[in-house]
Amino acid sequence: MTVLVLVVATLVIAGVGFFLGRSRALSGVSGNIGDLHSLPGYYGWHVALMAALPAFAVLLVWLIVQPIVIERSIGTLLPAETVADDTAFKLAVADIRRVASGLDAAVLAGALTEEAAAELTSGGTDVRAVLAGVGVALGSDVTNDTLLSAQKYRSMTATGALARMIAVLVVALAGLGYALGVTRADFRARNRVERVVLGVLITASSIAILTTVGIIWSMLSESLNFFQQYPATEFFFGLTWSPNFRGGSDLGFIPLLWGTLYISLIAMIVAVPLGLFTAIYLAEYAGPKVRAWVKPLIEVIAGIPTVVFGLFALVTVGPFLRDYFAQPFGFGNSGASVMTAGLVIGILNIPFISSLADDIINSVPQSLRDGSYGLGATKSETVKQVILPAALPGIVGAVLLAASRAIGETMIVTMGAGASAKLSLNPFDAMTTMTVKIVGQLTGDTDFNSPETLVAFALGITLFVITLGLNVFALYIVRKYREEYE
């Protein structure tokens, strides 16, 4: 039983429990709702929650623990030197998973029977060819150790799935039985349901916080490993970016920072005025019919995948800027440039700023507008001196969202700005950003013990600090210039 089917089965049990709990509560008072402590629906929800939540908790823990147990178990079949090397062990486990998935695909496609997949040996069969026949491509031949480990992996996974199904369904039915057993007229179902819901809300907020902590820790730990192998002063103040996995790398951070800020600056110069003016027009000047057409058309831009914008930059914007601006004025001959990426990212960010700013402007109380008009102010004066100051926090938030999107954009920069890490003021030169290099350093067969790979985490934590500082500065500006109204 797959996880999805198991979840659906648990929800079905919870749904049945809802109706059983409600009916049991009503039957206990012969249908007289006034004799119940809580409304009948609370009794139903109590039974449903007691059936679903413990079962989902068991399922979640099982999904986390089972892969760890299986990996430790199959480690006994691998050579000792592979298990001792953490990187080699991770790569071996990844190969085992690929082979196990290939065997599953072969069984599903009918190329192998379940018995044949379990008894397959690398000495008598070209396992790589068998898996290639069902669309699973492996980079190298399958060793006997890998094949045996993959077969054990499949066996343990199947056993674990069966045990998981039994455990989750038993817990769900046990919770259902317990909740029905305590369902009486004087049972405080509403109080219990509200406490459970409060616990769920606290858990959700805790997960969000712990996820943030986990992200920071994952980047920070690997970054510390990087700085133990590469001098921090050369990283933060180096002016050359030239990674070389054979040694002798120059991993200066400054060229990437400059490219990131330069492209983001051009994007914001394009996006902020256009987005803000669009929001002001739609909120204060456009009629209902115009607004009903224009606003959805602008928001369509937000739904276009960034790879499409990258193609637009590569095929249309880049050649246009090269042919009509760069070459005629002697700025360069390449279509990939800072200006190309900045313009396209700016277009991408227009709906983010306009939509959010429009909603914020519309939330300004109408009484402020009426008071301004009553004092003789024109519409433009009202917008400038009343509405925009009142909407400043929301507008700053919209600009921050667009700035974060510009700083973190990868695909458009890759296709529109090139991959050259250098310091230049020419907006028609090809440059790159930190996010592009993070992807580049982690792509392919990489050694996670080398500074050339670990530098991606150093770039990530540095980018995080930059965006955090940007948010703190924006919060200071908002608090200093915020206009408060009764």
Image: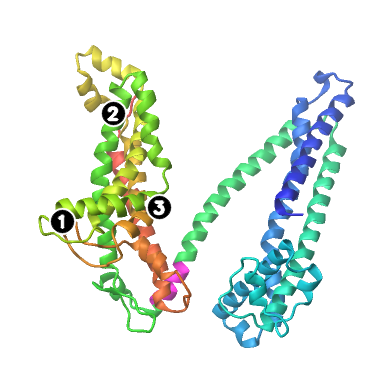
Residue at point 32% right, 42% down?
Answer: 399
Q: Earlier in the sequence, mark 1 or mark 2?
A: 2
In the rendered image, residue 383, in percent from the top left (x then y), is placed at 25, 25
Nearest to N terminus: mark 2 or mark 3: 2
* 442 lies above or below 191: below
Q: Are marks 2 and 3 in contact (CB under 8 Å)?
A: no
> Upstream in the sequence, badge 3 or badge 1?
3
Q: Which residue in the rendered view is the most extreme toward the top? A: 374
Q: Position of residue 407 (x, y in %)?
A: 33, 54
Mark 1 neighbour class, 10 Å CA radius: few under 14, some 14 to 19, many 20 or more? many
Q: CA distance from mark 3 to mark 1?
A: 24 Å
Q: Nearer the viewer, residue 155 or 134?
A: 134
Does dot 3 land on a helix, a strand or a loop?
Answer: helix
Q: Nearer the viewer, mark 2 or mark 3?
A: 3
Callout 1: SS: helix
Instruction: Specify start and end residues of the magenta stretch as a single range.
Output: 220-227
Label placed on residue 326: 1
Q: CA distance from mark 1 to mark 2?
A: 34 Å
Height in image: 157 above or below 169? Answer: below
In the image, residue 467 sits, relative to residue 367, either above or below, namely: below
In the image, 385: left or right of 204?
left
Residue topped by disc 3: 307
